[in-house]
Image (cartoon, rainbow, N blue to C red):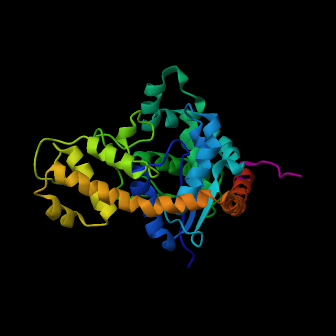
């Protein structure tokens, strides 16, 4: 029986952090043998908000190298860059012409980002979910690993699929495959070090809010030492009045690869002065092998580029096949 196919991606905007790793990439690595995986660097999504053109290509290679450094295995996974495959933008246009505008206007992430950007909001930001739908559908993905904040985007993708299949499909022969969200509860939302009620984010203006995967030990130590805590002694999970306590214990649990029960017992009588050095030591130890592998990969740019070329060629074969299927269903003439 063929393996189910998984599609996911991360934007090359700023340094990847523990939220990206613990909430997404590490989970991909843990389950990759079970699936046929397509992992892309979604650089087209990165330009839907203000960005630095001079850093885009370098950040793209950084994310690709971090995928490999984190443990993505090419025996089970394909790594490629979104913009290297023109079918992404072409299918997005076709989906645009099927997707009602009001479906996009109700998207929560668009509303939140639009408030922050004011008059700088682009059409691309509004259209972000349609491009994401194209990303997913081009690879006939069965499953899409997402956090709770991205689940609405997969639901929109499913709505688009149902609409196209209903309008353009034939009985018993759908045009597009209907994907399912794949959400892992544990570690799905890693919160900010400066505010335990907000998700750790690359867009947060404060570097102290996140631990980047490539932070040196002294930076990790500084950020944990200065992270927000509370005055209570004794550490516990799941107290709504202590969001930072829950978040830091969760970070320790995931980085140390321990169970919640074990961490609760270990830390229940600790004060912050005892726990913070423990978390610092654990974080540095967990990231050291990843950082060493990353440095090795970046020292050999020809190897990294060869992986991305191979990934592009393999991904393009699927993407072009699906695009042709959609264009045929929508009534386009075949290219001469």
Measured as percent of width and height from the top left, residue 32 is found at 50, 69
Measured as percent of width and height from the top left, residue 274 is found at 17, 54
Along the line of sight, which residue is nearer the eye, 310 or 284?
284
* Relative to 311, residue 61 above or below: above
Specify the principal SS of the magenta part.
loop
| Residue 307 position by quadrant | bottom right
- Count of numbered circles on the image: 0
Q: Residue at x 11, y 52 (%)?
A: 234
Q: Residue at x 23, y 45 (%)?
A: 244
* Relative to 222, residue 325 above or below: below
Farthest-out residue, front: 218
Examine the structure image and report whether residue 175 is included in the region drawn in magenta: no
Along the line of sight, which residue is nearer the eye, 129 or 66?
66
Residue 140 is at least partly visible in this image: no
Farthest-out residue, right: 336
Measured as percent of width and height from the top left, residue 53 is found at 64, 35
Left or right? Give the position of 37 relative to 243. right
Along the line of sight, which residue is nearer the eye, 265 or 124?
265
Quarter in which the N terminus is drawn = bottom right
Farthest-out residue, top: 119
Left or right? Give the position of 236 relative to 296. left
Q: Residue at x 30, y 54 (%)?
A: 280
Left or right? Give the position of 50 relative to 238. right
Start-end of magenta stretch: 329-336
Residue 128 is at least partly visible in this image: yes
Measured as percent of width and height from the top left, residue 246 is found at 22, 50
């Amino acid at each position: 029986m063929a393996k189910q196919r998984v599609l996911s991606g991360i934007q090359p905007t700023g340094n990847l952090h523990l939220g990206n790793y613990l909430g997404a990439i590490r989970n991909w690595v843990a389950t990759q043998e079970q699936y046929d995986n397509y992992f892309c660097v979604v650089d087209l999504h990165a330009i839907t908000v203000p960005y630095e053109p001079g850093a885009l290509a370098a950040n793209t290679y950084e994310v690709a190298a971090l995928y490999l450094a984190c443990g993505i295995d090419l025996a089970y996974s394909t790594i490629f860059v979104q913009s290297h495959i023109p079918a992404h933008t072409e299918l997005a246009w076709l989906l645009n012409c099927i997707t009602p505008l009001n479906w996009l206007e109700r998207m929560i992430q668009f509303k939140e980002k639009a408030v922050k950007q004011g008059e700088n909001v682009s059409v691309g930001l509004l259209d972000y979910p349609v491009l994401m739908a194209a990303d997913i559908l081009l690879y006939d993905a069965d499953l899409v690993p997402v956090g709770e904040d991205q689940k609405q985007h997969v639901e929109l993708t499913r709505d688009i699929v149902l609409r196209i299949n209903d309008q353009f499909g034939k009985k018993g022969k759908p045009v597009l495959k209907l994907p399912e969200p794949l959400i892992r509860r544990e570690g799905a939302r890693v919160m900010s070090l400066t505010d335990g009620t907000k998700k750790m984010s690359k867009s947060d203006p404060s570097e102290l809010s996140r631990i980047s995967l490539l932070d040196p030990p002294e930076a990790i130590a500084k950020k944990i030492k200065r992270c927000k805590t509370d005055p209570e002694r004794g550490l516990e999970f799941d107290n709504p009045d202590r969001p930072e306590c829950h978040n830091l214990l969760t970070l320790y649990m995931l980085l140390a690869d321990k169970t919640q029960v074990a961490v609760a017992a270990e830390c229940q009588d600790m004060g912050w002065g005892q726990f913070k050095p423990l978390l610092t030591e654990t974080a540095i130890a967990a990231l050291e092998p990843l950082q060493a592998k990353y440095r090795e990969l970046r020292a050999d740019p020809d190897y990294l580029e060869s992986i991305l070329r191979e990934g592009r060629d393999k991904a393009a074969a699927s993407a072009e096949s699906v695009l042709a299927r959609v264009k045929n269903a929508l009534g386009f003439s075949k290219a001469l």
